[in-house]
Amino acid sequence: MIRWERQAVPAQVMQARTAGLFFLVLLPFARAGQNPATSQLPPPASVVASGNGYVGNEACARCHAAIYESYRRTAMAHASGPALDSFVPADFTHKESGVHYRIYSEGRRVWLSFDRPGDPEAQGRRELLYFIGSGRRGRTYLFKTNGFLFESPVNWYANKQMWDTAPAYQSDREIPLNLPAYTSCLHCHVSGMQPPMKGTENRYPDPPFTQNGVSCERCHGPGAAHAGTTGANAAVANATVVSSIIASSTIVNPAKLEPARRDEICMQCHLEGKVAIERAGHHLYEYQAGENLSDYIRYFVLKGSQGSSSIGAVSQVEALDQSQCKKKSGDAMSCTSCHDPHRSPSAEERVAYYRGKCVACHGVLFADKHHEDHPDCVACHMPASPSADVAHTQVTDHRIPRQPQVSPQLLQDASPQSFAPQLVPFYSVDKPDVDARDAALAWASLAEGGMKEAEPEARERLSKAIKESPDDPALLSSLGYIEQKHGATEHAHQLYQKALSLDPGLIDAETNFGVIKAQDGQVDDALKLWRSAFQNAPDRSSIGLNLARAYCAEGKLFEARNYILRVLEFNPDLTAAKQMLKGFNHVPPSCSP
C-alpha cells in the first residue's frame, strides 16, 4: 500500500523566524568600505519615487546628513545586501551529515559548494546572491534555484565564531538545500521587498528587494510626498502617501505617534510570540509605519505555564513587557528609551551609554550608591543566556531582572506541553476582543506544531469560526487537516473542496485533498492537485514523491522519473528520492531501488 504524504497546514501563520534566519539584533557595521551605502553622501539630485512612494535613504540624506551618516553605520542599515558586499569565507565539514561545505568568491561572484566524500550524488554548488544579517549574532546567504529563493544551509554564528548548518538542522544527516526564504524573514532584514508571485511562497520578482538593510522609510513611512518626487510614478506615489494614515503630515515621526502606534514600529520585527496570525486579506509586509499593526497581524502568547516567563529569540518586546521598568513606567517607556535607532554606541561607549539610560530614570543619587565600582548595569540586569532554539547564540534578557538569575529561561519551550495551555493575544490595545478566526488559527498552529493538548480546542474553535466566516479558505483548510488526521475524510473532503473553490492556490489544501483523492482511487484527480501544488512549491519534496509514487503505480515510469529529478533539483540529498532514481536508472527501469 502506498503511503501518501500529507502537509501540516500553516494557514496564514507567519513562518517561524527561528527555523532558519535569526539575525534581528545586529552589530554596528565594522567594515564600512564594503557596502555601497557607506560611500560619501550622494550629490543633490531629483528624487524618483517607486510606485508605493518609497524613495530610499539617499533622498533623506539631502536634508538629514548627520543622521544619515550615523545611521548608515548601524546594524539595521546593514541587515542585508549583495553577497559580495559582506563575504565571509567558509570551509568546514558538518559532522552529522559528513558534508564538506565551502563558501568562496570567484571573480565577482560568491559560491557555496557542498560534497560528501564517497557520495557522487551529494555534490554541487549554488551561487550566493544576497547576505542576511550584519554579524552580531550571525549571517547567512540567499540563493536561487530555478527562480525560487532559498536560505543557505549553513550559517555563520558570531558568538562561537564558527560556521554550522542552519538553526534546527544541526543534527540532520542530509543537506538542507530547500529552506525557502519566506516573507517573514525578508520583511525584517530588507527594504522594498517585492511580494512573492501569486500562488508561491518564495518565488520573488527580480530583484526580491530594492533597498539593502532596514531603510529610513521602514520606521518613517514612504517619503515621496515629504521629499518631493519626479518621474512617472510621482503622482501615484504622492497620492499613496497623502491618503495614508498620517494625512496631516508627509512623514512619520515615531516619537509623535500615540504610544501604541509608536511601539508597533519596533514590534513588527522584535516580537515573536508563540504564534503570529496574519489577518484575512493582509500580510505583515504590507504594514507601514504609523498604521495599526493589528490590522495586519495578531500575536499570541502562552499564559498560565512556565512559558509565561520565557521569551523567544526575537521577542525583545514581549520580554520588556514583563519587566518592572515597563510596568511602572507604562507608555512613557519604549524601545527608544534605551535604544537610539539612528546610532549604535561603540564598544568603548557602551557601558557609559547604557548606564546613562538607567540613570535617566533611577537618578544620579541612586546610581552613586549602587555598585559604583561596577558601572555596567547591563551585565547584571540584562544578562545574556544561551538560546535554546537557535544554536550557538545568546539572548539578552530584556525583562531587566532586579537580581540576576542563575539560569534565566529566555525562550519559549517549543516542545509539546503537558499542561492545559492558555493562548492569549499580546498587546491588545485597540482590539481587546480578538475575532474568532485569528484565535482559531492560532490554536490550530499550536496543534499542528505538536501540542496535542491544543487539538481539541483548535477543532472546536475552527468549527465555530467557520460558522461566522464560512468563506475563509484558511479556516476551511485548517479544519480539513485536523478532520483528515482524525479519519473524518468525508468532512475533510468537503472543507478542502470549498477552500480551493475560494482560493485555488492553497498549496497545503491541494496536497492534502490529493491524498484523500488518491486513497479513494481517484488518482487522476490527485495527480492534478499535486501537479499544481508542486509547480508552486517545488521545494516541498513530499509532494514530488507523491507524484512519483502515483505515476509508478500507474506504470508511467518516465513521468515518475521526471518528478524525482525535479525533487532532486531542489533537494539533492534526499535519501528517498535518490533511492527511487537508482531504480529508474536500472535496466529495465523499476520503481524500486
Image (tube, rainbow, N blue to C red):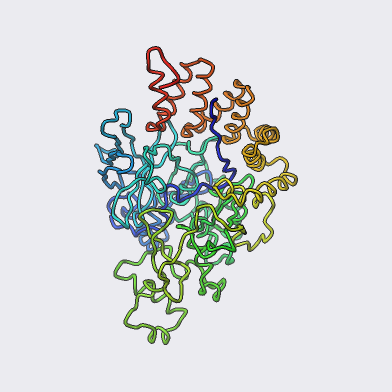
Which residue: 53% across, 67% down?
A: 321
Task: Give the vertical position of 262 relative to 454 (above or below).
Answer: below
Is 91 displayed left or right of 206 in the figure?
left
Which residue: 29% across, 34% down?
A: 115
Residue extending farthest front: 1
Say which quarter of the image contains residue 29. bottom left
Which residue: 29% across, 46% down?
A: 87
Residue 163 seen by the camera: yes
Say which quarter of the image contains residue 521. top right
Residue extending farthest right: 467
Is 351 displayed left or right of 274 in the figure?
left
Residue 118 placement (x, y as % from top left): 26, 31
Is 432 displayed left or right of 218 in the figure?
right
**Tag count:** 0
Residue 217 placement (x, y as % from top left): 48, 54
Residue 247 seen by the camera: no
Residue extending farthest top: 588
Task: Give the vertical position of 554 relative to 500 (above or below).
Answer: above
Which quadrant of the figure contains the N terminus? top right
Task: Give the vertical position of 566 relative to 487 (above or below).
Answer: above
Closest to the observer, 542 or 452: 452
Closest to the observer, 351 or 455: 455
Residue 562 placement (x, y as % from top left): 45, 21
Closest to the observer, 457 or 399: 457
Residue 94 placement (x, y as % from top left): 30, 43
Which quadrant of the figure contains the C terminus? top left
